[in-house]
Image (tube, grey):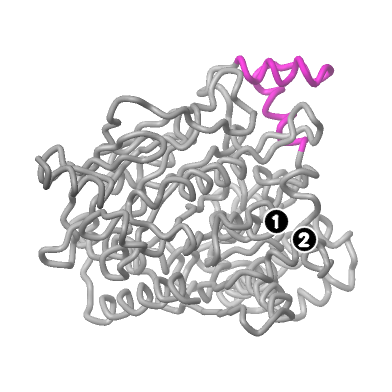
Amino acid sequence: MAGLFLLILRTGYLYADSNSPIVDTPSGKVKGIRVDVDGLAGAKTVQFRGIPFAKPPVGDLRFEKPQPVRPWNETKDASVFGPSCVQPFDKLLPYKNLFPNLKISEDCLVLNIYAPNDVDNQRNKTVMVWIHGGGYVIGQGMFYDPSYMAVKGDVIVVTINYRLGVFGFATLKNEILKGNYGLWDQIEALKWIKQNIYAFGGDTNSITIFGESAGGFSVSLLALIPSNKGLFHRVIAQSGVASSIFATAFTEPNYTLSIGKQVGCNDKDPKAFVNCLKGMSADLLPNVTKAFDNVIPDVIHILGTSAPVVDNEVLTDLPENLLKNTKSDACQFFKSLDIMFGNVKTEGSLILGVFTPVVQNMFNFNGSIGLPYDVFCDNIVKTLVNDYFSGISAVKDAICTEYGVRYDQGMQGMGAVDMFTDLFFMSVGVSTLRNHALSNPNVKRYQYIFTKEDKITSTRPSWFHGASHGNELPYLFDLRRLPALLNVSLTSYDLILSDKMIAYWTNFAKTG
């Protein structure tokens, strides 16, 4: 007994049995599970799944900032993943073989911890916190399995959930419905990690946040919030930076008002309107927007509607303005962090959403062949310039000249893809890195371009080529599980590339 007591004092945990470690955290005891790691014979991760980091955001807490979770007295079973936050169920079905479960709930503010081989609060391992993408309207932490990364890189990885769609980003841009609840969820998760991760062997002074797409937007936005100082120390933004048009909302209150009207809420009285939304059943709130293919007759908009907004609290100004003001607290905080920003070579694969039967019928073209020049220049570009550049004709002409191809629809399709890549991803990434470079030489910054094409069979048209949005993700997560899950084969190059990327990512997290 004396030996067991000394072990508890040293490590902060004891075993319920050999496969169910129990960790005593400031929030309460949690019982995890040991899991074999695909691709590493004999290696295991200790996983703690579905740990709540905030009170359930239901009832009166819907459309409110997350409240800290109350400590629990009983040992919490953390061997099973929690549900996804509310999102369209049909978006999950194509990937059902990749999900531990298909449960969806408003009570979803949970995180998952992956520790390499064992847990010991004296290990002081670097911590990496993954924030998922999905356009702020779909996604979940459990979709990504960082087990191989945790063991190979000898780091602790945490994946989190945050509220999505109308639940996370509804706003009237007033004190009654400020918005940014999903962003506040991310901050609350980071606070819980800062306060509790040492019990799992994590170093509270070496925390890196990383994410892709909306997750990349998110980590970049978090790096512009000075009150986050100390919650993390390095940032990896994959395929998305804060100054991108899609990082913040385009339509703001109009989206929320339209959602409310669809479910019968009267918008004349803001308080009554919000109370009406709070009283609605979660499955009645259509929480998805057409982020990249919002189409109305004769016009193709490329919009982001459900996203963070300037609320004069967590975000005091648009990201590009915060970065321009080099003396602002936001810019100074950003420049104090080591950063790594990057993209896949062909982010513009997202614009393939306009190649839908509806749009093709509307403009009488065959998307499998490509895109007609007049649809590109006289509709897509014209509408884009009206939406984002005040309709300035010189901007439209410059874009059409640079990316227009008159007599080859396949090349014009790729021209549209390249335009989307440069405008919404590459240019803003480079300008953000340049801004960061105007700081002290002790702070580090890196850029990468990922060029390996999709490992998974896709439905891209024959004229499309290049690494699509999200193609890097299997090389960080789940690559070695794909043969069994999706019947794809791996080459030695795939495995080498994955190991190199994981080494780059985890070494950056450790040392910058």
Where is residue 277? Give x, y as percent.
65, 20
Where is residue 281? Give x, y as percent.
54, 18
**Label 1: few (<14), some or many (≥20) within 10 Å?**
some
Q: In the rendered structure, which disc, 2 or 1, sits on the residue that comes first in sequence?
A: 1
In the rendered image of this protein, does residue 18 appear above or below residue 512? above
**Amino acid on which disc 2 is placed:** Asp
Q: Quadrant of residue 99?
A: top left
Asked whether disc 2 touches disc 1, contact meaning CB atoms under 8 Å apart, the reply is yes
Residue 404 in sight here: no
Magenta span dominant secondary structure: helix
Image point 30% across, 76% down: which residue?
499
Where is residue 27? Give x, y as percent.
41, 35
Q: Which mark is residue 389?
A: none
Q: Which mark is residue 329?
A: 2
Q: Is residue 404 left or right of residue 32?
A: right
In the rendered image of this protein, does residue 145 appear above or below residue 468? above
Pick the residue in front: 411 or 73.
Answer: 73
- The extreme front residue here reads 2
Image point 53% across, 22% down: which residue?
58
Residue 420 lies in the magenta stretch: no
- Residue position for label 1: 226
Please state the extent of the stretch shown in magenta in the rendering: 253-279
**Amino acid on which disc 1 is placed:** Pro
Pick the residue in front: 180 or 369.
Answer: 180
In the rendered image of this protein, does residue 385 appear above or below residue 362? below
Where is residue 28? Give x, y as percent.
36, 34
Image point 69% across, 71% down: which residue?
335
Mark 2–mark 1 Cα distance, whole angstroms, equals 6 Å
